[in-house]
Every structure is written in structure tokens, then in C-alpha cells.
């Protein structure tokens, strides 16, 4: 892999200029700062400067009990809190040698897939907005609102939900949960058609995204990209299939992949993923088993000494938790493998030779959340 | 918290727990035996041992996850072999654990994944106080930022890394926060003294 020195230490040519983008820039989706080395409007190289949102979550983890730390993970990828919670709870369950009962796994699957849809909707709306399409963001937020309402009814929170507990669930589903989810599903596919009508064959959209920010499959693997970024490059890999967790082994779904690894393909992959999530939710909602919602794991969690790495397919990619236990009530070491952090690393490679306007498109297509990049 | 405390005294005198125990015998399956690490011996480990002999340390299976200890002397060769011959082409994660007080203080942790075998493998590299380790950024591009983060948080120096700087913390930061002997309070006091010219109020 080609490695280059940082932008700040390189000597500029006569026509070259350094442009600072962010950390306060609407298209960088938070506090990402990108230093661009430009020749006119063409990007020669770039450097990401991150850490503005660093809160030391991994260090905090070492001073909290296993249960106390659970709400913190909601604040890493704060637009997909339910997925974060699922990954963390399952990792600790694995560490304990416990397993959530079937009913809990079903409800977890439904809520996590709804969260994936919500996260992708937020991505679609802002991505389109960055590129200049104003309309989709309103449509996307309309559907996202319905999902957040279901979360709110289920656990009282919309964004940082803390929906799951280690060992299963705290709350039984509310009366009318199934109806609400079904009602959402009933309308949802036609809504996705609406978005696609606006964008998929839109000439401006195609011009702005096709052939922009190409990432080959080999590069994507070498750079550790995961999630839709990896699949957009044509690698058919999904942790829900490779290492099934929750109740994913019970449902049928396809893994959409792209061909060219450009921004347009990643757009298509995420649109397909929303449809597949819808498919999973519909299968799951009709077959929620009855029974207990939490395993008996005791009030004080003391996992036996040892370590575990557990990862899930979060909306952004592979979200992993590596937890080392020394037998006490607090983790000895808690590592979060953030998909956004690793995916952001390919930005430099993808934007070389493109124009500044394309940088905005590529940042959008990577779908990063700075809370997770910086932790 | 307040709710729990209020509930507890109400629940204790109630006779339900004892009754429940009698009525519900299937309690043992709900709490399986705690997982225990066990020694691992499979084809891959045997091939590694045959090739790198003493550089491959203990191999264990902990919670169904394969872990191999690799000595830093031949770490790079082992990684190269795993990537090219055994097809572990995806570096999922690279991090470290500080075993403060142990002779070899740090464990460098690499989580590898192989697409063709759908298999994960965890490498552990014990490192001493001098904390030098060869960089694997030349093998997996992912390692570039992950090693920077590891350097930032643990102070492990990766020899041969193309651009080893802090990544999450500011350049002038002192110390490495994820080390067990890191003292955030001391750092605060020093910062206040230097920048505000007063004794810290902490």
C-alpha cells in the first residue's frame, strides 16, 4: 500500500495550495477536519485530523461495571444506538457464557433492523443534501420519525435508547408493538420507491456519484473497510451471515453488492439494504416466540477471567467489542472496534485526483459518525 | 437506582422466592458452566509451529475463539505468512492490553479474519517496557491508523510505521491514557499551572 507523508510536512509546488476543510463545515458531518493539498480545484493528497470528539470511552469502560457501561456505547455511533447496544450486550453475554432467550433475540433483531433503516435514512437524506438535492432529506426524516416513535414507545428514548440489557431485555414489548411495526412496514417499500424515483435515474445524481470515489475490492479488504463500503466494492460479506448473532440465522435475506465500488454503487447497496431490512423485520414480527425476555444472569456481573471479541454488522460496518475480564465487576480492558474510524481511513485514497465538490460526496458516501470515530 | 433500593425491602419478606425455587426446577440450564480457556491444537497451529518453532507460544481456545501467542522477534514473518499463505487477508482490529506489573507489560492484540475460510484468529504479542514492535502497516493498510491509535493510547512504538504520530489526542499531550498507571488528575494540575498560572482547584 502506498504511504505518503502528512500534508503539513510536504513542500508545496508553485500552483499548489493547502485548504482546510472543517472541523466546522456542514458537509463533514460533525467535527471532521480534512487538510486538502490542491492543485487548482484538484485534490493531490489529503490528511484527516480527528479526535475533536474524543471522550476516552474505552478508559471510562475500565472504571464502570459491565451494566453501568451499557449506556455509554449508545453515544459512540449516536444515530444507531440500538445496534451499539446489541453488540455490547452480546459481547458481555459471550464473556459470561450466557445467552439471551429466543423472545429477546427476536425483539432485538426487529429493533436493530429498524435502527439500520433509520441510520440509512439519515445517511441518504444528508448525503443527498450535501450533493445538492434538497427534497430527499424531508422524505427520509418523515420515515425515520416513525421508527423513532416506535423506539420511544418501546423504551422511552428516541436517540440514545439503551434499549437492551445484558442477558436480554428490560422491557416487554408494548401493546400494539406488532401493529406499529407492521404499519411502518406496510408503507415503507413504496417510500423507498419514492426516494429512488428522485435519485436513482436522476441525471445530476448520476453525474455527481458515478465513477466518483472508486474503491476496488482488493483495496477495500487491505484497508479494512467493512459494511456497505466493502459491499459496494463487490465483496459479498455480511457478519449477519458469516457469524450469525441475535436471530439472524432464522430469516431469509440477500446481501446486496455493488460492481464498481463507486459512490453510486454504495448508494444502490444501501437502498437495497433498507429493503432487505424491511424483509427481515416482516419475517421476524410474525414469528416472535413467547417466553421470558431475559436470561438469569444475576444482579452482579462477574465474568470469569478471559477475553472475547464479538462483532455485529452495524449500519456503518463491522462494530466489534473486545473485552478482557479479570474476574472482577469491571472490564479490565474494553476495546471498541469502530467501523467509522477504519472506513474513514480510505478517504485519502478515494479522493485523490477528484475535485473539492467530490470530496463532499465521498465523505457522505462513507457514512461516518464522528462520535464513533473519536470515541 | 432509587427505585431498586425501594423495591428491595418489599421483596425480601415475601415468600415467593422460596416457592419459586420449589416450583421451578429447570434453573441449572439457565446458568451454564462458566467458559474456560482450553489449549488449542489444530492444523493451522501445527503448521505455524513447524515453520516458526519457538516463536509460536501458547495457543488457546477461549469462548470458541482461537488465540495464539507470537514472540515479537518473528512477529512480522508470522504475519506475512498468515496473510499470504493462510489467507488471513483482513486485519479486523489492532489494539493492546496493559498488564501493569507483569514482566512483559503489554499484549499487542491483532484480530485477523480470513474471507476464504470464514475464520478468525487472534494474535497476542507480549511486549516489554521498551515497547518497540515492528509495524504491520506494510502488510495490512488498516494498521496505519490503528497503530497510530495504539501508539497514542499505550505508547507502543511501531518500528517502520510510515507516519507514527498521535491521532486522537493533540500533539502536545503528555502520557498515554490507556496505560494503567496514567494519572489524569496530575495532568490536569500541570496544565492549569502552566496555562492559567494558578494552583489547581482540584
Image (cartoon, coloured by chain):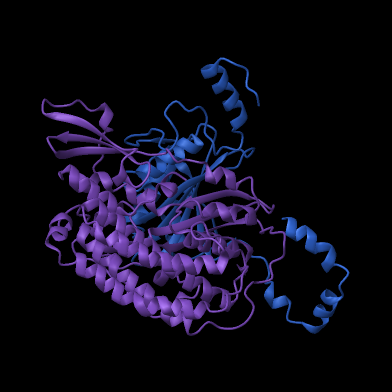
Chain colours: A purple, B blue
Left or right: B169 with respect to B64? left
Answer left or right for A249 relative to A26. Answer: right
Report the number of numbered marks: 0
* Residue at 67% over, 59% down: A304
Looking at the rendering, in which quadrant would you find the C terminus of chain B?
A: top right
Q: Is residue B62 visible?
A: no
| Image coords of residue A39 (percent x, y) | 13, 34
- Residue B49 x/y as whole percent: 46, 56
Residue at x 35%, y 77% (from the top left corner): A187
Would you identify the image quadrant in which residue B1 lies? bottom right
Between residues A308 and A149, which one lies in front from this camera angle? A149
Left or right side of A85 for A255: left
Residue B172 appears at what percent x and percent y?
44, 25
Regarding residue A43, the answer to whether it shows in the image is yes
**Observer-nearest residue: B76 or A178?**
A178
In this rendering, position of residue A262 left or right of residue A91:
left
The residue furthest top is B197
Q: Measuring from the top left, give residue A288's x and y in whole percent.
A: 53, 82
Q: Is residue B186 above or below residue A271?
A: above
Q: Residue at x 21, y 52 (%)?
A: A131
Residue nearer the viewer, A275 or B79 = A275
Specify the quadrant of the image occupied by residue B58: bottom right
Please report the residue visible at 41 percent of the width from the left and 34 percent of the height from the top: B166
Nearest to the observer: residue B58 or residue A291: A291
Amino acid at each position: 500500500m502506498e504511504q505518503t507523508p502528512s500534508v503539513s510536512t510536504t513542500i508545496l509546488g508553485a500552483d499548489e495550495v493547502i485548504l482546510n476543510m472543517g472541523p466546522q463545515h456542514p458537509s463533514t458531518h460533525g467535527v471532521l477536519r480534512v487538510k486538502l493539498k490542491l492543485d487548482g480545484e484538484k485534490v493531490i493528497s489529503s490528511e484527516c485530523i480527528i479526535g475533536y470528539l474524543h471522550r476516552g470511552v474505552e478508559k471510562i469502560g475500565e472504571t464502570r461495571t459491565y451494566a453501568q457501561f451499557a449506556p455509554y456505547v449508545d453515544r459512540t455511533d449516536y444515530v444507531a444506538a440500538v445496534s451499539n447496544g446489541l453488540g455490547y450486550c452480546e459481547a458481555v453475554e459471550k464473556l459470561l457464557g450466557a445467552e439471551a432467550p429466543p423472545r429477546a433475540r427476536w425483539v432485538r433483531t426487529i429493533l436493530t433492523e429498524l435502527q439500520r433503516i433509520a441510520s440509512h435514512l439519515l445517511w441518504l437524506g444528508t448525503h443527498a443534501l450535501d450533493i445538492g438535492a434538497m427534497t430527499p432529506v424531508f422524505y427520509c426524516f418523515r420515515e425515520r420519525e416513525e421508527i423513532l416513535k416506535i423506539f420511544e414507545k418501546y423504551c422511552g428514548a428516541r436517540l440514545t435508547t439503551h434499549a437492551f440489557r445484558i442477558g436480554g431485555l428490560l422491557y416487554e414489548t408494548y401493546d400494539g408493538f406488532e401493529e406499529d411495526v407492521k404499519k411502518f412496514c406496510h408503507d415503507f417499500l413504496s417510500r423507498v420507491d419514492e426516494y429512488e424515483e428522485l435519485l436513482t435515474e436522476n441525471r445530476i445524481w448520476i453525474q455527481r456519484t458515478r465513477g466518483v470515489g472508486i474503491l476496488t475490492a482488493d483495496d477495500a479488504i487491505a484497508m479494512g473497510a467493512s459494511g456497505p463500503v466493502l459491499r459496494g466494492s463487490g465483496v459479498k460479506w455480511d457478519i449477519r451471515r458469516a457469524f450469525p448473532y441475535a436471530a439472524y440465522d432464522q430469516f431469509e435475506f440477500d446481501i446486496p453488492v455493488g460492481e464498481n465500488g463507486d459512490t453510486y454503487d454504495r448508494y444502490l447497496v444501501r437502498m437495497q439494504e433498507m429493503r432487505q431490512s424491511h424483509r427481515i423485520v416482516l419475517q421476524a414480527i410474525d414469528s416472535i416466540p413467547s417466553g421470558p425476555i431475559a436470561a438469569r444472569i444475576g444482579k452482579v456481573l462477574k465474568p470469569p477471567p478471559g477475553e472475547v471479541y464479538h462483532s455485529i454488522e452495524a449500519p456503518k460496518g463491522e462494530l466489534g467489542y473486545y473485552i478482557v475480564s479479570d474476574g472482577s465487576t469491571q472490564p479490565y480492558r474494553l476495546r471498541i472496534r469502530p467501523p467509522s474510524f477504519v472506513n474513514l481511513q480510505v478517504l485519502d485514497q478515494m479522493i485523490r485526483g477528484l475535485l473539492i465538490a467530490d470530496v463532499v460526496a465521498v465523505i457522505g458516501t462513507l457514512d461516518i459518525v464522528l462520535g464513533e470515530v473519536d470515541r | 437506582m432509587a427505585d431498586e433500593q425501594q423495591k428491595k425491602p418489599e421483596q425480601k419478606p415475601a415468600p415467593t422466592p422460596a416457592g419459586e425455587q420449589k416450583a421451578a426446577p429447570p434453573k441449572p440450564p439457565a446458568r451454564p458452566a462458566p467458559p474456560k480457556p482450553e489449549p488449542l491444537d489444530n492444523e493451522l497451529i501445527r503448521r505455524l509451529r513447524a515453520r516458526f518453532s519457538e516463536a509460536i507460544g501458547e495457543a488457546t481456545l477461549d469462548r470458541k475463539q482461537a488465540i495464539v501467542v507470537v514472540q515479537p522477534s518473528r512477529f512480522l514473518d508470522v504475519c506475512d505468512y498468515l496473510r499470504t499463505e493462510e489467507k488471513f487477508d483482513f486485519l479486523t482490529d489492532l489494539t493492546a492490553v496493559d498488564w501493569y506489573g507483569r514482566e512483559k507489560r503489554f499484549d499487542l492484540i491483532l484480530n485477523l479474519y480470513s474471507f476464504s475460510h470464514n475464520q478468525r484468529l487472534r494474535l497476542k504479542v507480549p511486549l516489554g517496557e521498551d515497547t518497540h514492535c515492528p509495524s504491520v502497516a506494510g502488510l495490512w493498510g488498516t494498521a496505519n491508523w490503528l497503530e497510530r491509535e495504539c501508539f497514542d493510547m499505550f505508547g507502543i512504538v511501531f518500528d517502520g510505521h510510515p507516519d507514527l504520530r498521535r491521532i486522537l489526542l493533540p500533539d502536545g499531550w503528555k502520557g498515554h491514557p490507556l496505560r494503567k498507571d496514567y494519572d489524569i488528575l496530575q495532568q490536569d494540575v500541570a496544565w492549569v499551572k502552566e496555562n492559567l498560572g494558578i494552583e489547581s482547584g482540584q
